[in-house]
Image: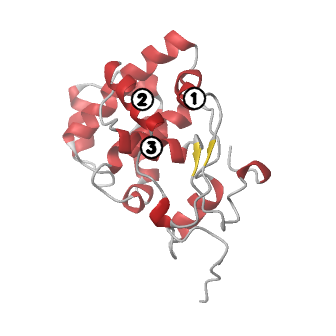
Amino acid sequence: MLLFMRTDTCPWPSDDLLMIEYHDAEWGVPLHDDRKLFEFMVLDAFQAGLSWRTVLHKRENFRKAFDNFEPEVIAGYSEEKITELLQDAGIIRNRAKIRGTVENAMAFLKVKEEFGAFDRYIWQFTGGTTIQNNLTSLSNIPVSSPESDAMSRDLKKRGFKFVGTTICYAFMQAAGMVNDHLTGCFRHDITKIKGLE
């Protein structure tokens, strides 16, 4: 079977269909749904030390294992549930990251209570708008920024785990807080192409 490969796209998804779909429909699209923001926060934390491809291919398993990323449910996870998750071969079985997810759910709910929505809190780090980068090569894509530094510091103060500046920058890319599609990519002008809700 021949696979048509676009030439006017970012090269990092390569020929992986799931990565291509993620790039084309989700990555860089401004996101304001609290549950989805929490999902990306969880997945980016699990990505630490691993490839995004590994995490993305396990995303459906994560959704099932972590109650569709509902922070209200995850915040109440018991030790028994954590032990159960550690035995789930469909996800990344890292005790610190699983415990961190539970702690992050608790911290997430506190932020939501304080600000009315996590969305309102997290987008303040980019002034409520998408930072438009005009990058021409993968080698130009940064791994952090002053905004991700500030986000990381504040999240840590609020009790979040696995929120170093690199993870925060990956989150910003996923949530459309920064647009790192290359200038030659058909998704660079994300304002004209509707992504997944």
Q: Is residue 145 above or below residue 23?
A: above
* Quarter of the image where the N terminus is located: bottom right
SS state under label 1: helix
Instruction: Kindly state the secondary structure of the residue where label 2 is placed.
Output: helix
Say left or right for 36 vs 148. right
Q: Nearer the viewer, residue 156 or 97?
A: 156
* Cα distance in 3D space between marks 1 and 3: 13 Å
Q: Quadrant of residue 180?
A: bottom right
**Where, by quadrant of the figure, is residue 41 drawn?**
top left
Mark 3, secondary structure of its residue: helix
Q: Amino acid at mark 2?
A: Ala
What residue is shown at x 38% (from left), y 20% (from top)?
107
Residue count near mark 1 (Cα–Cα under 10 Å), binned few <14, some 14–19, many ≥20: many
Position of the C terminus by quadrant: top right
Say which residue label 1 marks.
123
Q: Quarter of the image holding residue 34?
A: top right
Residue type beneath disc 1: Trp
Residue at (35%, 27%) from the top-left corner?
153
Residues marked 1 and 3 touching at CB (< 8 Å): no
Q: Amino acid at mark 3?
A: Tyr
Q: CA distance from mark 1 to mark 2?
A: 12 Å
Q: Point out the tag, 1 or 2, that comes first from the N-terminus.
A: 1
Residue receiving disc 3: 169
**Where is residue 76 drawn, in percent x and y?**
34, 21
